[in-house]
Image: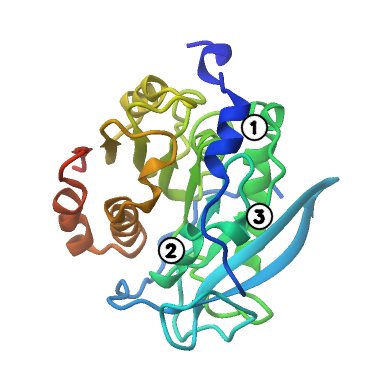
Amino acid sequence: MSLQRRTFLRLSTLAAATAGVAPLVGAGPAGAAPAGPVAAAPTTPFAVGVRRYDWTRGSRRCTTYIFYPATGTPGGAPVANAPVANGVFPVYNFTHGLGGNPQNSTFSPALAAAGFIVPAPHFIHNLNDVNNGNTSKDVSQIITNTLALNRSGPLAGHINTGIGVGVSGHSMGGMVTHGLLTRWPDSRIISANPQSCLDMGNPAASVRAKVLFVHGDQDPTTAYSSARQAYAEMRWPKAFLTFLSGGHSSFWDDQRFRGTVINWAHWTMYGDTAARDRLAAGATGPGTRWEAQLG
């Protein structure tokens, strides 16, 4: 499929679709990392902290908010610069869509509460930069910078740098995420979750990730058929959660969406087979279709 067929997008619709979520208070890719020890997946949620890092890649701004498990009472808004919780946690990046902002998203804190270090870059998205790989390369640099925080500073000793990383994203962020599995590969990625994405290219041989797609089949902005092609091209283990009659971001408030992504992350990053076994039941119900080739 040509690049032009893969990357069509209606920007005005996308900007409207990614606005209005609940507010919060408060170098190039390396080779595949060797397997490292990983603790059992958390069974109860954490409080969430957040720290801002004003990074760059060359002349490109890569301002990033890192959400992480924190000390304190679970369930509240992320607390700026809160002490990190005891433990060593995997990295799972989240990239927002057009018009989004990490400070106005509830998804990154939900991942952090589930036991992940979540770099969430704040991009002023540009479709050209998404299509030419600049934004995917930015995310790779942000992952490198995040892993380096394990050596010094307030997150030192709390980041699992030995098992690989996860990446997720919605809309343009979903395209950036799929780009990291295809045309601009990052071989550190072992888990991915493109949401409402377009097919950005053929899977790269250097990336061996377990990939969960989420999409509404009536999405007027990023064509469901394009995401279906991306899924068909992807090697297993893989899964696809379809929200029937769903739009571009209508599933965001559906607990089956969040629960499925967290179960996917717990399985693929923590090796939690119980989370894997919960996937089908948690994703299935009125208005959804679950497909999986898990091996």
In primary-sequence order, the first of circles 2 and 1 is 2
Q: Which residue is mark 3?
A: 142
- Residue found 32% across the figure and 62% down from its top: 266
Provide the secondary structure element on which disc 1 rests.
helix
- Give the amino acid type for the residue marked by disc 1 in the picture: Val
Q: Which residue is mark 2?
A: 111
Q: Quadrant of the C terminus?
A: top left
- Give the amino acid type for the residue marked by disc 3 in the picture: Ile
- The residue lying toward the viewer, choosing from 87 and 229, is 229
- The residue lying toward the viewer, choosing from 78 and 12, is 12
Q: Quadrant of residue 119?
A: bottom right
Vertical order, 102 against 156 (above or below): above
Which mark is drawn over residue 182? none
Relative image position of residue 120 (x, y in whole percent): 59, 57
Q: Which residue is mark 1?
A: 130
Spatial CA span between label 2 and label 3: 17 Å
Q: Is residue 208 visible?
A: no
Vertical order, 77 against 170 (above or below): below
- Residue found 58% across the figure and 13% down from its top: 4
Provide the secondary structure element on which disc 3 rests.
helix
Relative image position of residue 227 (x, y in whole percent): 39, 27
In primary-sequence order, the first of circles 1 and 3 is 1
